[in-house]
Image (tube, rainbow, N blue to C red):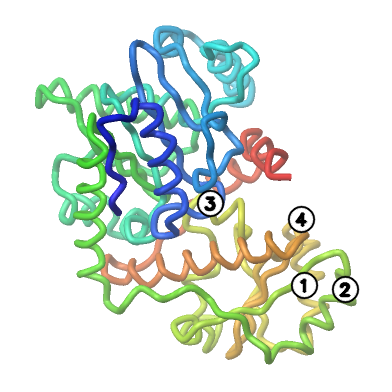
Amino acid sequence: MKATSSQKDSPFETLVRVSREYGSNADFVLAGGGNTSCKEKGRMFVKASGTQLGTIEADGFTEIDLEKLSKIWTSSYSQDKDQREEEVLSDLMASRVDPEGRRPSVETLLHGLFPFTYVIHTHPALINGITCSREGERAARKVFGEEIIWIPVIDPGYILALAVKEKVDAYEKEKGIFPQVVVLQNHGIFIASDSIEEIDRIYTDYMDKVKALSPRPVPEKFTSLDDLDNLLDSLSRLKPELTAKPYGNPVLSGYLKDKDSFAPLAESPTPDHIVYSGYKALWLEDGQKLEEEASAFEKKEGFFPRIIAVKGRGIIACHTSESKADTAAELFCDHLKIAVISRAFGGIQFMPVENVNFIRNWEVEKYRASMAK
């Protein structure tokens, strides 16, 4: 990644360009994941909720008054989590320079914590091969170094921001410097600096280290399959309003031998996977029972499976449009990469059920979905 800054650009102009560079690189960001920010003269520009980094323009950022934002840390909020999130959101919206401006990213508080010009937050599969592994923190510190801040899996939003603030405050008090890297279990990584070049260097160093430790090459993206037509016909009869597309690759085939082999891909490792490819996949032992199994899955889980794994053959991505089916498959391929990489660190560890349920019912994700439409 060579997202270098130009001496002629302002910090904000640099932010817009660098955000597109990171956001259009699938090694760092998929779909609507990730967010970025820059600070200058008491203000912060942060990615607006519902925008995508890969195509973001200047109007895709929200300008924040940092003094107003900082007051959230000393405010008191309800003990009821739903009421609390509403209250924090209200104060977050009030911190906008333009009261009619776009809604800022839910991670705006985290961006505001860093006393650096730039913050780049992404969800690389290479990094998440560690954050979503059973060895988690121990592996992260061994590979990335003791200077990182490690945050155990926690619901996003205000509670996550509080947890990070507590850790970074303690780090700063002990070491006399502010940490530049925060690694979030089952989520991703924040890297901050006054220099884009330094952020780029840290990302490259970390990802090269993980790649060198991977037990096998990181798999390439999925390719379309042409031998699942009978199942596509069944899906068309069952759900004519959905688009269904078959995919596979050689690495995936090893996970489709039987249900036990598929276990590392059965549930979600990060919030992005919950949002875009469903929090769990349907395993199909017998293609003849597709309609029966898919209907039972929908009745039990409350949604039609976005990923159907067919024993010995491939997967089918299902969604309301071709582009959304492609995105679901892309995120599932990212899941496959995480599963492969995590084998070097004790194997994959999914998000806990309570955190999965929070994401599924979270108002912010519903807002992002409405913006995507």
User: Marks 2 and 3, Cα distance to the nearest angstrom?
Assistant: 27 Å
Taking the image as shown, residue 217 lies to the left or right of residue 78, namely: left
Residue 294 numbered tag = 1
Examine the image and state in which quarter residue 366 appears: top right
Say above or below: 12 vs 23. above
Residue occupying image coordinates x 52% and y 11%: 97
User: Marks 4 and 2, Cα distance to the nearest angstrom?
Assistant: 16 Å
Residue occupying image coordinates x 68% and y 92%: 227
* Residue bearing the label numbered 4: 302
Helix, strand, or loop for circle 3? helix
> Can residue 105 be seen?
no
Question: Disc 3 vs disc 4: Cβ atoms closer than 8 Å?
Answer: no
* Residue bearing the label numbered 3: 272
| For marks 3 and 1 on the same chain, the one whose residue lies earlier in the sequence | 3
Q: At which x and y percent is residue 206?
A: 22, 54
User: Marks 1 and 4, Cα distance to the nearest angstrom?
Assistant: 11 Å
Helix, strand, or loop for circle 1? helix
The kind of residue tagged 4 is Gly
| For marks 4 and 2 on the same chain, the one whose residue lies earlier in the sequence | 2
| For marks 1 and 2 on the same chain, the one whose residue lies earlier in the sequence | 2
Residue occupying image coordinates x 34% and y 27%: 11
The kind of residue tagged 2 is Leu
Camera-nearest label, 4 or 2: 2
**Quadrant holding the N terminus:** bottom left
Q: At which x and y percent is residue 204?
A: 23, 54
